[in-house]
């Protein structure tokens, strides 16, 4: 039943059929939208009416292509900014957390660690509403009692970043910690004996060692942020991120420009995925 | 030349386990001191306490008269060469060597000069840009030493630095290290389980066993006047005999060999005699010695280290060093020879 | 040990801030808010929870969602396991690498695009319907979308990917030689599967199931876009309370109930497999 054993043709071909069906199932939605991005029609689906690039570039009232749709471009831009900030924040705090839990012992360490990995098993919805509730409460309190009215406490760009960061740091921490476990602790001792302070030793010796994992964590966090909906929806303000914008368009006003956006996303992700698999092979 | 390092009644416990007990060592500036002992005797623990990675349970460590209690490694005037070398793999040779100098906030020109100079001294000129994993064992060794020595420490600690090298390289490095130490003058504290390393390189050696210092002495004294049975057995080759009882001035081994050993004021349990202490077919008269006949059982030819195995009374087996000169070339297995050993060379201990 | 302390606080403070401000306090607030009335008075009440239990649409949806989530999890396992097995044990590593790439793409593209893709495929004028019409096999469109089936497809789609990866990880550690040995001793494929492969991959199966269950039960997009009027999903209830009717405290109660069911199920699953939470992290 495995590659090193002889298998009956029925088993082999049966398996192959199943796997093929599976991958067709997997790729159909993505292929469909990608191909239909070039369909010369205002319907989001078939029938096929000819090839066009309208849904990317056209700028008229009947057809607003991706690159002419200012609202859509704006939400893409919001998403890029959000994801970049969130990924940066997540990677930094995640790396710090990995170092903290791996190198130090302190009271309540187990409890802290429990909370650090809790976001893995808390549905995104819950993270979203809990942060919304808490920030609104704090914002309200500050406003009524101290007259401070800060934007950050209400739904908006920064709350989205923070909300996504709350679980992004968890994933970053786990990715970095996996690599940290392979680190030879004697290297840090050597640095100390060469008169580096503990922080210097971490900065000059441990962090360079962790670099591949840190980069990986950044990419993963970025992707998680870019596609996030469940948490983001509760925290968005007037400027939606791309997933939020897509959602309202799918529900209320769908045109093939959605296909165009989807195609671009699929294309980008394919490139990123290919690069990441190649760099993984190289790192090994 | 004053006392640079003093270990006062150092003890270290891990729960019930005693890693060190009442260790007292006084090291003079410029000395090459080895701590010698089998695996698990506590020597690495001792080193880590001196370096500051471990805190002593009892006692005090003083460097240049100042107590090191509570002082972290990066603040002690000590540098350490690790057994695994712990070279930084993401840096090249130069960056490794200059690392410590940069932490001292030294200027670029000055640190560069010192680093290059040190690389020169250890014979690695031109190696600056090489990556660590491109180096041979011996080269890595020298980078590790250069990295620590460039810091001009008052004391350099070395944790079995030669253990990963092959024999020929090890012999070569022993001499190199000794000369380097003499040239630079830093106090070296050297940890090893290889007694040949300790004897060859050191001014004094502390022989350690099960957390205790058995004897702290010059290599010559350790070899010729071992104070305990452990030292006698551990340092150099030795013949060991279990003692059954005494009879007047004679000591009787468990296998029945009777040996005269005058002026013993305790009940010995074990006896050691060096292979080279036995004289074979001695010429002229011998005084204050035991004399006996023995049959040569086996000749173990090993060039200059040739030894013969004899059995006096066909019971105890004794290893005797046989000098390789014309006098003994005709000896064959089965020959009967006369053997003499001076009373002074018969060492008895109560274990 | 001054340098050590300094390093510790430098690392500890950001982590503590993250955990307190973004995880611990918000969840405390969630808990407390669920006991506050929707009128805005500053008292404590059980009215939100009473509303949940008394209005059958709420708790029916809740139970429905939970059972459905369990069902989708099992389905995801059934669908994914053969694929995971195939990729780790049957085909060569080179091809497996390429297929892994194909798996990653839908994963990273995200829910919105993939669910939208299904709308395009299953819709009234979708790819399937139009193709069948074109081939002359049907005249009017089949109702493939806006029902429980399409919703399940959407949920299953996202789940499979999260199920495959943990299983692959544990399968990779299964020594081929064990299967070969069992085979050599006369075991049938089914026996090998049941007695060797499944037990060995249990940790991966449990981990995958935990992640899938949590994702499905908390999903909004698939039920909302692909589901029909009758497909009630509890997350939608939470969404409505927060973004439609603005009964935040009511929503908090619902959220807290969802959190409980999610946590309890995960706890049971972890107990069953004898694992600890920190092993779940990839």
Image (cartoon, rainbow, N blue to C red):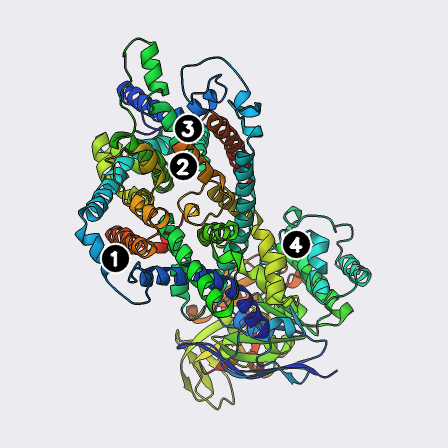
Q: Is residue A167 left or right of residue B151?
A: left
* Left or right of residue C14: residue A120: left
Looking at the figure, which quarter contains the N terminus of chain A?
A: top left
Tell me how far mark 4 sits from mark 1, CA to CA: 70 Å
* Residue at image coords 70%, 76%: B31
Tell me the CA gap for discs 2 and 4: 52 Å
On the image, numbered disc 4 is attached to which residue? B140
Task: Pick whichever of labels 3 and 1 is earlier in the sequence.
Answer: 1
Q: Chain of mark 3?
A: C
Regarding mark 3 in the picture, which secondary structure is present there? loop
Which is more toward the observer, A161 or C214? A161
Q: Nearer the viewer, residue B130 or A127?
A: A127
Query: Is mark 4 in CB contact (under 8 Å) with mark 1?
Result: no
Q: Position of residue C80 (x, y in %)?
A: 31, 34
Q: Are marks 3 and 4 on the same chain?
A: no
Can you identify the residue that label 3 sits on? C92
Q: Is residue B271 visible?
A: yes
Question: How far apart, in angstroms, are the residues tagged by discs 3 and 4?
Answer: 40 Å
Question: In what element is the residue under mark 2?
Answer: helix
Q: Marks 3 and 2, how far apart in space?
A: 30 Å
Which disc, if any, is residue C48? 1
Between marks 3 and 1 in the image, the one whose residue lies nearer the viewer: 1
**What is the secondary structure assignment of the residue under circle 4?**
helix
User: Pointer 2: what residue?
Assistant: C111
Q: Are marks 3 and 2 on the same chain?
A: yes
Q: Nearer the viewer, residue C243 or B104?
A: C243
Q: Is residue A130 above or below residue C179?
A: below
Q: Crowdedness of circle 2 by 10 Å Cα count: few (<14), some, many (20+)? A: many
Where residue A123 appears, as percent x and y from the top left, is: 35, 49
Residue at horizontal 49%, vertical 72%?
B41
Asked if the residue under mark 4 is in contact with the one under mark 2, i.e. CB atoms within 8 Å, the reply is no
């Amino acid at each position: 039943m495995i590659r090193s054993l002889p298998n009956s043709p029925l088993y082999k071909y049966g398996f192959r059929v199943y796997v093929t069906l599976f991958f067709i199932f997997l790729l159909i939605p993505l292929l469909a939208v990608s191909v239909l991005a070039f369909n010369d029609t205002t319907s989001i689906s078939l029938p096929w009416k000819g090839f066009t690039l309208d849904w990317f570039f056209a700028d008229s009232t009947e057809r607003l292509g991706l690159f002419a749709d200012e609202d859509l471009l704006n939400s893409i831009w919001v998403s890029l900014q959000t994801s970049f900030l969130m990924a940066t924040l997540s990677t930094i705090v995640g790396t710090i957390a990995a170092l903290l839990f791996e190198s130090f012992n302190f009271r309540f360490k187990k409890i802290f660690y429990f909370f650090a990995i809790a976001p893995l098993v808390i549905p995104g919805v819950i993270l979203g509403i809990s942060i919304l509730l808490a920030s609104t409460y704090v914002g309200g309190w500050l406003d009524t009692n101290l007259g401070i009215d800060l934007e950050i406490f209400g739904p908006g760009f920064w709350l989205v970043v923070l909300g996504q960061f709350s679980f992004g740091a968890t994933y970053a921490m786990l990715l970095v910690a996996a690599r940290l476990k392979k680190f030879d602790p004697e290297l840090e001792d050597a640095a100390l004996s060469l008169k580096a302070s503990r922080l210097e030793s971490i900065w000059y010796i441990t962090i360079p060692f962790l670099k591949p994992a840190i980069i990986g964590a950044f990419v993963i966090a970025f992707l998680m942020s870019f596609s996030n909906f469940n948490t983001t929806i509760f925290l968005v303000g007037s400027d939606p991120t791309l997933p939020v914008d897509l959602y309202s368009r799918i529900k209320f006003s769908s045109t093939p420009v959605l296909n165009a956006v989807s195609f671009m996303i699929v294309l980008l992700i394919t490139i990123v995925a290919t690069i990441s698999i190649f760099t993984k092979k190289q790192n090994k | 030349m004053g006392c640079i390092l003093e270990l006062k009644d150092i003890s270290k416990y891990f729960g019930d386990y005693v890693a060190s007990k009442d260790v007292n060592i006084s090291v003079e500036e410029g000395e090459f001191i080895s701590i010698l002992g089998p695996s698990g005797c506590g020597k690495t623990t001792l080193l880590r306490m001196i370096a500051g990675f471990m805190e002593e349970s009892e006692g005090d460590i003083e460097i240049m008269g100042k107590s090191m209690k509570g002082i972290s490694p990066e603040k002690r005037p000590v540098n350490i060469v690790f057994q695994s070398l712990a070279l930084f793999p993401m840096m090249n040779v130069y960056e490794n060597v200059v690392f410590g100098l940069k932490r001292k906030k030294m200027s670029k020109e000055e640190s560069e000069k010192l680093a290059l100079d040190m690389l020169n001294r250890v014979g690695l000129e031109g190696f600056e840009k090489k990556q660590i994993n491109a180096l041979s064992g011996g080269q890595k060794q020298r980078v590790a030493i250069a990295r620590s020595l460039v810091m001009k420490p008052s004391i350099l600690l070395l944790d079995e630095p030669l253990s990963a090298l092959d024999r020929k390289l090890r012999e070569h490095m022993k001499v190199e290290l000794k000369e380097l130490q003499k040239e630079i003058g830093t106090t070296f504290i050297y940890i090893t389980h290889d007694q040949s390393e300790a004897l060859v390189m050191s001014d004094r050696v502390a022989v350690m066993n099960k957390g205790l210092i058995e004897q702290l002495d010059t290599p010559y004294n350790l070899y010729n006047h071992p104070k305990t049975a452990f030292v006698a057995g551990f340092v150099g080759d030795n013949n060991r005999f279990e003692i059954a009882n005494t009879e007047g001035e004679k000591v009787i081994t468990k296998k029945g060999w009777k040996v005269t050993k005058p002026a013993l004021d305790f009940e010995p349990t074990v006896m050691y005699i060096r292979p080279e202490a036995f004289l074979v077919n001695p010429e002229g008269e011998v005084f204050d010695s035991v004399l006996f006949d023995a049959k040569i059982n086996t000749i173990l030819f090993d060039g200059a280290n040739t030894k013969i195995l004899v059995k006096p009374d066909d019971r105890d087996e004794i290893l005797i060093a046989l000098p390789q000169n014309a006098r003994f070339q005709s000896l064959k297995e089965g020959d009967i020879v006369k053997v003499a050993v001076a009373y002074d060379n018969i060492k008895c201990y109560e274990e | 040990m001054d340098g050590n302390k300094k390093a510790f606080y430098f690392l500890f403070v950001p982590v503590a801030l993250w955990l307190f401000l973004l995880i611990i306090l918000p969840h405390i607030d969630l808990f407390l808010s669920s006991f506050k009335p929707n009128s805005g008075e500053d008292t404590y009440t059980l009215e939100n929870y009473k509303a949940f239990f008394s209005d059958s649409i709420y708790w029916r949806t809740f139970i429905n969602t939970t059972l459905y989530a369990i069902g989708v999890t099992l389905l995801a396992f059934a669908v994914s396991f053969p694929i995971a097995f195939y990729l780790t044990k049957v085909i060569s590593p080179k091809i497996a690498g390429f297929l892994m790439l194909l798996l990653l793409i839908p994963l990273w593209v995200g829910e919105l695009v993939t669910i939208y893709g299904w709308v395009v495929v299953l819709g009234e004028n979708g790819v399937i319907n139009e193709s069948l019409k074109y081939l002359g096999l049907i005249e009017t469109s089949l109702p493939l979308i806006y029902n429980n089936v399409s919703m399940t497809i959407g949920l299953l789609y996202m789940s499979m990917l999260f199920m495959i990866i943990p299983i692959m990880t544990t399968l990779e550690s299964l020594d081929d030689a064990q299967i070969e040995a069992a085979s050599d001793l006369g075991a049938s494929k089914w026996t090998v599967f049941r007695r060797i492969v499944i037990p060995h991959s249990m940790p991966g199966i449990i981990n995958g199931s935990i992640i899938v269950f949590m994702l499905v039960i908390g999903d909004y997009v698939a039920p909302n876009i692909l589901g029909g009027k009758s497909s009630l999903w509890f997350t939608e209830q939470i969404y409505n309370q927060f973004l439609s009717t603005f009964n935040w405290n009511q929503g908090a109660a619902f959220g807290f109930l969802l959190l409980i069911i999610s946590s309890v199920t995960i706890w049971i699953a972890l107990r069953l497999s004898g694992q600890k939470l920190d092993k779940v992290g990839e």
